[in-house]
């Protein structure tokens, strides 16, 4: 199959289905001014149930919905479009909304971007000791965009909100001076939009450096769900698989971090064949997704996904909580409900499916899992734990938050038992202040130069 992208610039292709009302077309047009919209012919033809599309999870996952914006925001943009407002005026208002949607949650821009020899490495994030994220500049788009995406600023054209780096040599230099790093995660966007020849240049640079402490290369991708033909019939599909083999032949673990949000994404012959092709290279495929209202807020969906993924040879890895960014108000599930969904799904599968961890919040201090809800000393509490932390010493220490039935994120919680702060907060705040001080000193140095 040949890849064809649909965006609001060529929306007539989709409107030709004749299923969308004028109000729905208008809503997509308005919301896509703020949240990026892009889908493709595979999603439209093979994943969406057009007979029931208004409630279809694949439709909602790809097509912006009216309620993803606040009513006053939606109405003002609609009015500006209807009145043919100046594009610069519309852009200013749209950017105001984007900034209000917390475009870089958990301190991604302020606290996760490292420096090397005084230079800020804007295509790298290094939050956890062992794992470094790398954003290759040619991989900062996707085959189709998820409407919940927490990295939506990558696709809006606001360059000040974007992570990207071309120079793999800087990546290698940073690796050399950080021997604790064992894992590189290539992310985006989606690295699998890159041509195989571009991907291979990055991989050759990394492998050629002979970094002894590098044990795993991860590639984060939605391509198996939204364009499995990337590994089957694209002109360079075989070259992509050859690059994967090059990694595993060197004795380095290759983990494809595949995003699947619903079992429909596992249902086609194309994705099943693509999974076989990738696994034949020696790569592992690990699966993850946030729990999302309107998409997968049902234990049956998760139990079915995990069982099917294991049947296909993949490893269930994470259930996340929807991040506090973008359309969280539309997709967000409160923490008690997220815990219920995870627990009920977990109970319905066998041990081989129970490799999955969750529900997990990727917060500023680290990945925090809701372990349970309990009553301790007469107080109802959330029992929590760090899966990963800015300080690795935080991992494995249980801590407690006062039960809040409406909480959707860590910021909605307070310590239990009358404590004034969580055990990690004092150290975390100190780390953040040190980051701010380093950033300010670097700014003053550059200004003086």
Image (spheres, rainbow, N blue to C red):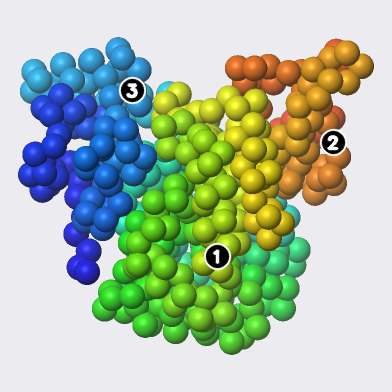
Q: Residue at the location (28% across, 76% down)?
A: 233
The 10 Å Cα crowd at callout 3, few under 14, some 14 to 19, many 20 or more, is few
Out of 56 and 318, give the one closest to the viewer.
Answer: 56
Residue named by callout 2? 398
Indicate the position of residue 70 as horizontal and vertical percent values: 35, 17
As drawn, the label of residue 67 is 3
Nearest the viewer among 330 and 219 is 330
Question: How many other residues sit within 10 Å of disc 2, few (<14), some (14-19) or many (≥20)?
Answer: few
Q: How far apart are marks 3 and 1 (CA)?
A: 36 Å
Q: Which of marks 3 and 1 is in front?
A: 1
Q: Residue 139 carries which label?
A: none
Proximity of marks 3 and 1: CB atoms separated by less than 8 Å: no
Horizontal and vertical percent position of residue 84: 8, 23
Pointer 1 residue: 311
Secondary structure at badge 2 equals loop
Residue sitting at x 65%, y 33%? 339
């Amino acid at each position: 199959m040949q890849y064809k992208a649909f965006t609001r610039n060529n929306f007539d292709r989709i409107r030709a289905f004749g299923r969308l009302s004028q109000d729905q077309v208008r809503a997509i047009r308005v919301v896509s001014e703020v949240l990026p919209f892009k889908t493709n012919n595979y999603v439209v033809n093979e994943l969406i149930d057009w007979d029931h599309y208004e409630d279809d999870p694949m439709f909602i996952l790809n097509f912006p919905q009216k309620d993803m914006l606040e009513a006053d925001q939606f109405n003002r943009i609609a009015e500006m479009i209807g009145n043919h407002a100046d594009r610069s005026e519309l852009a200013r208002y749209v950017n105001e909304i984007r900034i209000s949607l917390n475009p870089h949650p958990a301190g991604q821009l302020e606290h996760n971007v490292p420096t090397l020899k005084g230079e800020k490495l804007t295509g790298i994030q290094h939050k956890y000791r062992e794992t470094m994220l790398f954003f290759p500049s040619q991989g900062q788009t996707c085959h189709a965009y998820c409407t919940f995406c927490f990295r939506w600023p990558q696709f809006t054209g606001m360059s000040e909100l974007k992570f990207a780096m071309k120079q793999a040599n800087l990546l290698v230099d940073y690796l050399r001076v950080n021997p604790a790093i064992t894992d590189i995660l290539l992310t985006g966007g989606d690295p699998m939009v890159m041509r195989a020849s571009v991907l291979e240049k990055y991989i050759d640079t990394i492998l050629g450096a002979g970094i002894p402490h590098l044990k795993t290369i991860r590639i984060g991708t939605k391509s198996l769900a939204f364009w499995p033909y990337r590994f089957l019939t694209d002109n360079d599909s075989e070259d992509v698989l050859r690059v994967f083999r090059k990694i595993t032949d060197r004795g380095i673990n290759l983990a494809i971090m595949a995003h699947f949000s619903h079992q429909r994404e596992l249902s086609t012959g194309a994705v099943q064949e693509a999974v076989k092709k990738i696994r034949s290279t020696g790569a592992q495929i690990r699966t993850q997704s946030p729990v999302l209202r309107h998409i997968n807020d049902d234990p049956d969906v998760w139990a079915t996904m995990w069982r099917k993924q294991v049947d296909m040879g993949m490893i269930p890895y994470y259930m996340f909580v929807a991040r506090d960014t973008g359309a969280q108000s539309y997709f967000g599930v409160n923490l008690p409900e997220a815990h219920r969904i995870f627990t009920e799904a977990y109970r319905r599968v066998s041990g081989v499916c129970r490799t999955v961890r969750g529900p997990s919040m990727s917060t500023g201090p680290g990945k925090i899992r809701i372990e349970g809800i309990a009553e301790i000393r007469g107080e109802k509490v959330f029992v929590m734990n760090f899966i990963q932390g800015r300080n690795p010493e935080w991992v494995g220490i249980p801590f407690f938050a006062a039960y809040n039935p409406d909480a959707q994120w860590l910021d909605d919680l307070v310590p239990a038992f009358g404590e004034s702060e969580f055990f990690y907060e004092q150290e975390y705040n100190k780390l953040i202040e040190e980051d701010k001080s380093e950033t300010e000193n670097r700014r003053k140095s550059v200004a003086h130069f």
